[in-house]
Image (tube, grey):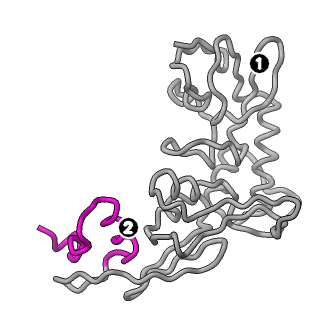
Amino acid sequence: MIKLTIDSRTIEIEEGTTLLEAAKRAGIYIPTLCYHEALTPIGSCRVCIVEVASNGKSGLTAACTYPVEPGLKVITNSEKVSEARRLALELLLAQHPHSVRIQRLAQKLGVNPPPFTLEEKECILCQLCTRTCREIVGASAISFISPGLGRENNEAQIEVSQIKCIACGSCCYACPTQAISMEDSGDTRTICTPSGQMEFKLKRCNNCGRYWAPQKQLEYMAEKSGLELAAFDLCTDCRD
């Protein structure tokens, strides 16, 4: 067990635990946007910033990626922390003013809309969709493309491969700002992403005739499970 201090409270926690997880277990609130307990943390949103002090030095770091250390002193509500979070949320609000999730978080932390605006975008590049698709679904259909010299893209962006996508909609559920949306109409599922719109055919139940799941998702499930595709001829309501 590792002993550290968070907001003047001594906490004992298992080695390998992050500061965010340690704070949550101790009932100490740290805001997040890009974090999910089932996914590898990357600290992209910078909303979970905390101040840490070790060996006479202090600095700001993302709590979701920083592992606990013996004797570490952590402050979650210092002036430096509040200013860093305020700046992060102001930038998010300036570019994503219609995001209900960001508005609620800003209101909770007392952050007002900034006096400036940026080009509006729904995607905040939190990469929850890419991590969900890769780590949970296993399809790896979504890529995070970073800008750089010799590359065509000038800005970081999310790209979705229609070839690899199985239309399961997990990315839509994971997205905190509704930058990815999904709609079923008739025999078609339409998924709108930052990189474009995609359409997928839905499977029709052999018994009730209802369109109930994407054909590609069922093919993927059959391959992963080793079952025959015919095992998915009936919807969940019509199966015994």
Q: Is residue 210 above or below residue 28?
A: below
Q: CA distance from mark 1 to mark 2?
A: 48 Å
| Image quarter of residue 155 | bottom right
Question: Residue 63 in the image: x percent, y percent?
Answer: 66, 33
Question: Residue 190 in the image: x percent, y percent?
Answer: 50, 80
Task: Tell me the residue that label 2 is attached to.
Answer: 220
Residue that protrudes farthest toward the bottom in the picture: 186
| Image quarter of residue 22 | top right
Number of numbered discs overlaid on the protein picture: 2
Instruction: Tell me, yes or no, whether the highlighted magenta stretch contains residue 60.
Output: no
Instruction: Residue type at mark 1: give it.
Output: Ala
Q: Which mark is residue 53?
A: 1
Residue range highlighted in magenta: 212-240
Q: Is residue 47 above or below residue 155?
A: above
Local secondary structure at mark 2: helix
* 141 left or right of 42 in image: left
Q: Residue at x 53, y 75 (%)?
A: 163
Mark 1 or mark 2: which comes first in sequence?
1
Question: Residue 109 in the image: x percent, y percent?
Answer: 69, 43
